[in-house]
Amino acid sequence: MTELINLSAAALAEKLRSGEVTSVEAVQAHLDRIAAVDGGERGVHAFLHVNAEEALAVAAEVDAIRAAGGAEADSLHPLAGVPIAIKDLIVTVGQPTTAASKMLEGWMSPYDATVIDKIRAAKLPMLGKTNLDEFAMGSSTEHSAYGNTRNPWDLDRIPGGSGGGSAAAVAAFEAPLALGTDTGGSIRQPGAVTGTVGVKPTYGSVSRYGAIAMASSLDQIGPVSRTVLDSAYLHELIAGHDKRDSTSLTDPVPALVEAAKAGATGDLTGLRVGVIKELTGEGYQAGVQQRFDESLELLKAAGAEVVEVSCPNFKYALGAYYLIMPSEVSSNLAKFDGVRYGQRVLPKDGPVTIERVMGATRAAGFGDEVKRRIILGTYALSAGYYDAYYGSAQQVRTLVQRDFDAAFEQADVLVSPTSPNVAFEFGSKSDDPLSMYLNDVATIPANLAGVPGISVPGGLSEGLPVGIQFLAPAREDARVYRAGAALEKLLEDAWGAPLITQAPELAAAIEEGAA
């Protein structure tokens, strides 16, 4: 069964359709992998909850439909029977949803998120819920109330954040696909440091209904996978208008799979690629910069026209983000008050008033990083400071959007390293929040402007993965798939195999599993 976990989602789906393997066999192989590598003191700890019984039941249903043949079998989604992991920030019926917080420990949602409705309708067995920084606040998955997730490339290093669990599950071959959420880079940055593919769709193109809100004007659900084509399949599945999300776009779902397949030819003739001057050079590790420069040479060789573009207001994006995001956090998390959701903590002494219950519950339920951001946001929104902080940050956001508009007049897609550094060791930035926040310096501008982005593996530095990010104008998600698939093809031709095969601990674990 070990070979099943090594397959891409598209390759596994083809084997399921041909009858070469069953979905039950595929799901069981991934459950066995989870049991082998996820637990224990040195386990990856990508999952907070494993959903074996339901996943196997869905797999058996798919197998029965295929065995019976006929119209129902013919109408199955291309990914039917392919297992998937879900970030534990997306609500699901029948599985706990905790947002990696003590505040929601044991909470079961009474409804499914829209993306989960689509996953169920397409009959993808859900393996379980993956770890994250509490309420998606962090860049390292060190802020989960249920312990760190480890990077499968080096178990002493972070897997990125906040979606470290989803990225680690895919990188460790515990799942071929996963769903994440991206508020400031929480899909792309973990993808970069784990050697996986992570996509942030155009804001509003995938429904956010049922994703626990962190910062509503920035949040976006997106796919995590080991190949660009796999992300395209999943992205097409979850995209589309949703009347339950007031920010949902009414645009038709673009042909992303077609774009990824076109890119996989490795031909980029006619594509103008803009190198963002402000997102390279100083501040980026030498190895990261070297892999990025090598990728640019490959893009040129494939026929792309590479030009330099300047986005002068990007240097203010990080500061603006850390005013807008916590401001929205302070508002969105106000509902976790010990009355309507999650746990309730009574004060240890004194009168039991609503204010004191609320204070005791929030003090016990939220972790330090969440409290830090609530305090920052509350201050930024307070009377007398609103215009100076939140209002100014929104003005900077407009300037960032204008930078993108000007850049896209010169280039079809923009490119940069996804993260300025490779995965760092646990605890090395815990006492320096600003240093931690800088991990998202290259990904945050896309969230402020609502444009799509993809991170693809770009090689190794210090033996650890480096990510390359492509950005496109809003509603032009197909462009990032074309460019990403092309670079993936060119690099894998140069390496002779996908980057993930070069992970020493992963390879050893796979060989051990096969023995």
Image: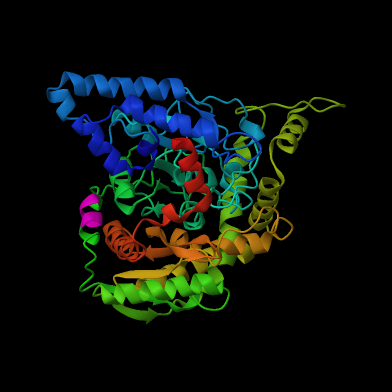
Q: Outermost residue, left direction?
A: 70
Q: Is residue 406 visible?
A: no
Residue at the location (44% across, 44% down)? 170
Residue 425 part of the magenta segment: no
Locate residue 398 relative to residue 17 in the image: left or right. Answer: right
Locate residue 302 relative to residue 453 in the image: left or right. Answer: left
Q: Where residue 143 appears, x then y in whole percent?
A: 65, 46
Q: 229 and 431: which one is in front? A: 229
Residue at the location (23% across, 31% down)? 20
Q: Which residues are magenta?
A: 257-261
Position of 185 relative to 233 (above/below): below
Q: Where residue 229 appears, x then y in whole percent?
A: 29, 51
Color scheme of the displayed model: rainbow
Number of marks in picture: 0
Q: Where residue 245 appears, x then y in whole percent?
A: 38, 41
Residue 458, quarter of picture: bottom left
Locate residue 221 relative to residue 360 in the image: left or right. Answer: left
Residue at the location (75% across, 38% down)? 363
Q: 210 and 464: which one is in front? A: 464
Q: Is residue 166 visible?
A: yes
Position of 416 relative to 239 (above/below): below
